[in-house]
Amino acid sequence: MSFEIERKFLVHGDAWRDLAVSRTSIRQAYIAAEGKASVRVRICDDQKATLTVKGRAVALRRLELEYPVPVLDAEALMPLRQGAVIEKDRYVVPWGDLSWEIDVFSADNTGLIIAEIELRREEQEFDLPLWIGPEVTGQTLYYNSSLALRPFCAWSGLDRASGERRIGEAPTRPIVQINR
């Protein structure tokens, strides 16, 4: 069984771009986006596709099961989606012994850039690059499944301010020590 341990942050500036070692164009849709699990179909560079089931997060950890599927099958599943198709370019940026995945959203989510880092264990320490902004881990507003149902372009000024305010609130889970 596979689990994902991931932290998410907003991104400041574009200094990370010179450090990127790869770029993948992604289209993904959520067959199920609410409840105890989400079911996602993803097509990368129009050449590779996966079907993924993710459980809801418990602290930083959540169940993630991913299966390769033929691209034609993935294309056939796209119209069964809830909400909009998520379109983004994913850049991989090595940092220390880990790699950041920087998602630059387009279409209805243009303007949103989120960095994710996958950890080996929940309490793992890691260095934050200077281009990393506020942490949004656990804030459902920033989940891809939420963006499919309520894209960034639909957020009002109040929504954006509320999201920023939530970023600064006291966490409801223990914070992992982060080295800068």
Image (cartoon, rainbow, N blue to C red):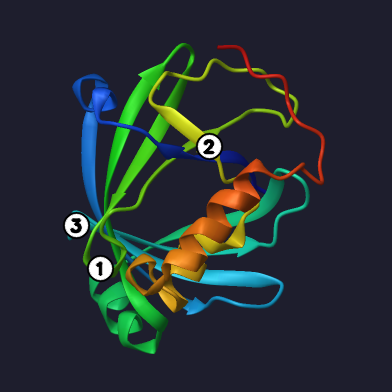
> What residue is at 31 percent from the left and 63 percent from the top?
109
In front: label 2 or label 1: 2
- Judged from the image, the secondary structure of the residue bearing numbered disc 2 is strand
State which tag comes first along the sequence, 3 or 1.
3
> What residue is at 68 percent from the left and 77 percent from the top?
35
The relative height of residue 78 versus residue 178 in the rendered view (above or below) is below
Tell me the distance, in whole angstroms, between the alpha carbons under discs 3 and 2: 34 Å
- Judged from the image, the secondary structure of the residue bearing numbered disc 3 is loop
What residue does disc 2 label?
Answer: 134
On the question of residue 20 being in view, the answer is: no
Horizontal side of 126 relative to 159 (left or right) equals right
The relative height of residue 10 versus residue 111 in the rendered view (above or below) is above
State which tag comes first along the sequence, 2 or 1.
1
- Judged from the image, the secondary structure of the residue bearing numbered disc 1 is helix
| Snapshot quadrant of residue 87 | bottom left
Q: Label 1: few (<14), some or many (≥20) within 10 Å?
A: some
Q: Nearer the viewer, residue 152 or 63?
A: 152
Q: Nearer the viewer, residue 162 or 120?
A: 162
Q: Label 3: few (<14), some or many (≥20) within 10 Å?
A: few
| Image x and y of residue 136, in percent | 57, 46
In front: label 3 or label 2: 2
Mark sitting on residue 71: 1
| Image x and y of residue 77, in percent | 35, 82
Mark sitting on residue 47: 3
| Image x and y of residue 53, in percent | 57, 65
Q: Are marks 3 and 1 in contact (CB under 8 Å)?
A: yes
Q: Residue furthest bottom?
A: 80
Tell me the distance, in whole angstroms, between the alpha carbons under discs 3 and 1: 7 Å
The relative height of residue 35 versus residue 180 in the rendered view (above or below) is below
Amino acid at pointer 2: Pro
